[in-house]
Amino acid sequence: MMAMLRSEVEGARDLDLLWPILWIEPFDLRTATDILTFSCFMSSLLAFWKPDLWLARASFAILLLFGAALHGSFGGINHVYHIWIWVAVVFVFLPSAISRVGQLAYCLTFATAQALILFFYSLAGFWKVSSGIAVMLAGQEGNFSPRGLALTLADRMVQTGTEPLLARFVIDNYFVSWLMFLGIIYVQFMAVIIVFRPRLHVIWGLALLGFHTGTWLLMEISNAQHLMVLLILLVMSPFAKEWRSLATLRDLPLFGGLFFGIKEDKAVQINSEQPA
């Protein structure tokens, strides 16, 4: 973030400071940027070194908000740091106690971070569903039509003058892109439900990682900052249960009822019967 902000500040002519960093207006912008980003970096190291020190976590959350606000003061809001900000704020409330109450509070805080992030993805899915239905009722091609994603990709290529690695292939084979797009709409729209279905944490985390990889390959939109959060909160979720069983399909939102005939794996049953 430090190098990127410095280069943006040096090349900026006009700057519309967002409200979290209005206080730096009287100062030299280049100096303030260096101090702010360096402080954010050092606070992240301190929070990593002393994870039980809530003041270190709180300092990182505040300084990250300042850095993201400065990044968004150059004429357009970029949401790549929004997830990091919210996770940092939630993790401020991680308890330091190792008692049973502290352990339960730790689990609740971690689950809250998961729910918040997955809710953001569900919002994105909701807008894809609602706009797709509206366009479909208007008799036009949209998110649910076979050429929906292909048309979106073609329009973006014309507007940006880019040619992403797999965009042309997906446009030419739009039935493949249609199935992919319907799948990602489902994954996003149902994301928040996955908080309560631990066996799906890893699967949904990998699916969302695939989604962000796809946005780069098809649109050259990079959200690399989201990948680490998804790895920590979902792929490495402390609540994740055995998921490499066909019985996991029974937990799928909307479609789980189709797989009720699949029996639980015996190893999973034995583990689940062990006393806590």
Image: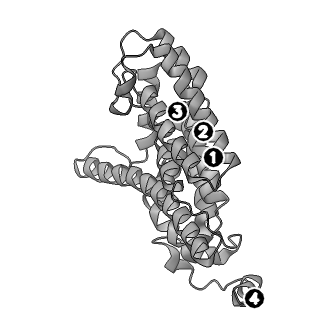
Q: Amino acid at mark 4?
A: Ile
Residue 43: give x, y in percent of width and height: 60, 39
Crowdedness near tag 4: few (<14), some (14–19) or many (≥20) residues, C-alpha within 10 Å: few
* Dot placed on the residue nearer the N-terminal end, 4 or 2: 2
* Dot placed on the residue nearer the N-terminal end, 3 or 4: 3
Please say if the residues under marks 1 and 2 sit with CB atoms less than 8 Å apart.
Answer: yes
The mark closer to the camera, 4 or 2, is 2
Residue position marked by numbered label 1 in the rendering = 47
Residue 221 circle label:
3
Q: Amino acid at mark 2?
A: Ser
Residue 73 vs residue 165, the one in the foreground = 73
Q: How is the image coloured?
A: one colour
- Whole-angstrom CA distance, mark 1 to mark 2, is 6 Å
- Whole-angstrom CA distance, mark 1 to mark 3, is 30 Å
* Dot placed on the residue nearer the N-terminal end, 1 or 3: 1
- Whole-angstrom CA distance, mark 4 to mark 1, is 39 Å
